[in-house]
Amino acid sequence: MSGQSWRITPARRVRGVWRPPGDKSITHRAVILGLLSRGATEIKNFLEADDCLRTLQMAQQLGAQAERLGAARWRIGGRGDEPLREPTEVLDAGNSGTTTRLMAGVLASHPIFSVLTGDASLRRRPMRRVVEPLQRMGARIDGREAGSRLPLAIRGGELRAIKHLSPVASAQVKSCILLAGLRAAGVTEITEPTLSRDHTERMLRAFGATLEVQICSEGAHRVRLRGGQALEAQRLTVPGDFSSAAFWIAAALLLPGSDLTIEQVGLNPTRTGLLEALAQAGVHLEWSTLDEQAGEPIGTLRVRSQPLGAMHVGGALIPALIDEVPILALIATQAHGTTEIRDAAELRVKESDRIETIATELRKMGAQIETLPDGLRVHGPTPLHGAEVQSYGDHRIAMTLAIAGLLAHGETLIHDTACVQTSFPEFETLLHELVERE
Ligand code: S3P
């Protein structure tokens, strides 16, 4: 998605009480498990953003009945024991890596032929990490660059369980293999070097599946799932998206006099690494876990502006804040000292090469940032000034630059902001609703 631009003028502060839109990762999974279940799944606080609507459309192409019951409320009629319908058209995941990799596991485990593709950014992203294990399970898959890139042609069928040792902590890889494993003969086992977001494990349990989770030596995590388990439809409410909230946490922290309360936000510890990084910076945030939604902890966060110190972020913390690194880099420009973010080479294969794109664009606004092969070094605090910048079609880069524009002196012009529709359509409205101007 390309086009559109935003002019951002400096803000005075952010204030208010706000409930973030539904979590992107969890909405994808609710649709996919709904598709595979017996009965009708009802989803409230569904994130009606482009990425999740791609998953929904794909589920419909595979034979799910989907009905919109109201704003952010959907009913998905599952296939249950019926096989998935062979799609007559190419399946287009747009910009969504989660749609592609999770659906690849579903497609590979059903006796149908399908072709999976996406936009220019997604067609550059690595797919070998899911293609290779699915081939070992018995699926026939081919694609560009020896099966490393979309489009992929998938002939699914009867699979056998495998033991897979993933070299990266990736929830998309883990989820792909678990979804394929649901229909494989035997017990599928996936081990990752550190724990990535565990929404699939939690939601599979909520839909009635049994799985075993084990912590191995040196922090590695293993999940085991027996094939042939049926899923039962559920009613669920998607928690607020912590990754979307992160942009406003940053704005409230960095704009003096801010006071923002964020309600019903997902506080799954595999997602809230940003809070740990901020604790290192000496930030005190008030938060409480109040309830559970869809097997996920949710709660309230209150953010008030305060000074920050430098952070050293790496190792097992990285998967828990991987999508927050662009906004963390911006926060670090205002922290006292030199922040280092390491062990984050995965950022190079996201919607853009986020190590390069965030450093290049924040430098245009006056930030002092060095790129490292696996991360960033940010020197702070530095005052930011308005500039003409671009998103590279990456939603999280666009939104980080918008928050930077609120802090900067003068006007910031951000090109190519339509991509924000992939995860956070409401973001632009909030630039007016939560922000007080001079
Ligand atoms: C996601 C997993 C992460 C994350 C992405 C969403 C998911 O990707 O960056 O935005 O929903 O499973 P990886 O699994 O590639 O790390």
Image: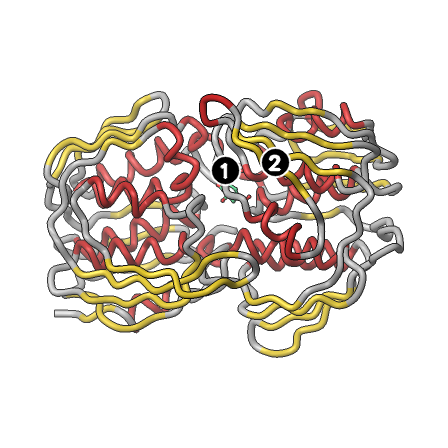
Q: For disc 1, does the CB lie below 8 Å from ligand 1?
A: yes
Q: Is mark 2 within 8 Å of ligand 1?
A: yes
Q: Which of disc 1 and disc 2 is earlier in sequence? A: 2
Q: Is residue 436 left or right of residue 314?
A: left
Task: Locate residue 410, reporting x and y percent.
Answer: 14, 56
Q: Is residue 171 above or below residue 283?
A: above
| Residue that lies at the very extreme toward the bottom in this rendered image | 70
Return the x and y of residue 231 as percentages of the image width and height: 76, 54
Is 327 drawn above or below residue 60 in the view shown?
Answer: above
Which image quadrant is residue 282 in? top left
Secondary structure beneath label 2: helix
Residue 223 appears left or right of 245: right
Per the image, the residue denoted by label 1 is: 196
Residue sitting at 15 percent across and 48 percent down? Answer: 385
Q: Is residue 314 left or right of residue 151?
A: left
Q: Residue at x 28, y 34 (%)?
A: 359
Q: Which mark is residue 174?
A: 2
Q: Residues within 10 Å of mark 1 (few under 14, many from 20)?
A: many
Q: CA distance from mark 2 to mark 1?
A: 8 Å
* Label 2 neighbour load within 10 Å: few <14, some 14-19, many 20+: many
